[in-house]
Image (tube, rainbow, N blue to C red):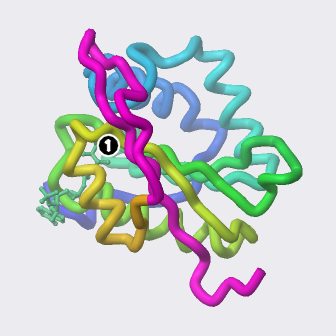
Amino acid sequence: MSLPDIAIRPIAYADIPGFHAALDSVAQEGIYISTQRAAPLPNVASFIVGNITGANVQLVAESAGQIVGWCDVCHSGSIVFDHVGTLGMGVIASHRGRGIGTRLIAATIAAAWQSDFQRIELEVYASNPKARALYERHGFTLEGTKRLGARVGGTYLDVHQMALFRPGWQP
Ligand SMILES: CC(C)(COP(=O)(O)OP(=O)(O)OC[C@H]1O[C@@H](n2cnc3c(N)ncnc32)[C@H](O)[C@@H]1OP(=O)(O)O)[C@@H](O)C(=O)NCCC(=O)NCCS
């Protein structure tokens, strides 16, 4: 499969089942994100409806009608953090290493700046150097580490906190 077969675009209501399946697939790997199963479909649906109708950003990667990845930047809901978005992303295992994550995060960051976020932050396990390298390639810097802040598959792991500011932002 070549890269032009992959569309990177904003999520749509019709993507809810496909996004749920992709999220569940990455979650079931059990080592990358904070859940081992996706939330039930209605919960995921309300998250997506909130993203589409609200001020969050969520893009998906689609290949031949299948959602194979996503990247989102979401508000916490608190007014004091209104300028801040938290980034989450994943690409299903069969589609990794082909530049989809790179395209997703680049497009999502650009959309987040358009959407008036000033700071994007994220957390990544110390056991996930590929994701950390991807974030560093896109300008994220390490702000701190929650020592042994997660227990993943019975192993305690450091959790790195990274952030990126909108270029030129003057608070
Ligand atoms: C982290 C993640 C999103 C990256 O997505 P990806 O699609 O694999 O990322 P890319 O393909 O853009 O980049 C990964 C690698 O492929 C290489 N690459 C980029 N474009 C490429 C292309 N056209 N062809 C081949 N390789 C390519 C990159 O150089 C990179 O190299 P690396 O192996 O040294 O890291 C993906 O690995 C993933 O979903 N992991 C599990 C979930 C996860 O970790 N989520 C983040 C939690 S914080």
Percent position of residue 49, x then y: 74, 36
Image quadrant of ligand 1 equals: bottom left
What secondary structure is marked by label 1?
strand
Question: From which residue to which does the magenta span run?
Answer: 143-171
Percent position of residue 61, x then y: 40, 51
Query: Which corner quadrant holds the C terminus?
Result: bottom right
Q: Residue at x 28, y 50 (%)?
A: 131
Relative depth, front residue between 82 and 116: 82
Query: What residue sits right under mark 1 in the picture?
Result: 91
Percent position of residue 97, x then y: 15, 53
Query: How many marks can you see?
Result: 1
Residue type of the residue flagged with mark 1? Val
Is residue 65 visible in this depiction of the protein? no
Secondary structure character of the magenta stretch overall: strand
**Above or below, 40 relative to 163:** above
Disc 1: residue Cβ within 8 A of ligand 1's nearest atom? yes
Q: Residue at x 20, y 51 (%)?
A: 130
Is residue 48 visible in this depiction of the protein? yes
Question: Which quadrant of the figure has residue 139?
Answer: bottom left
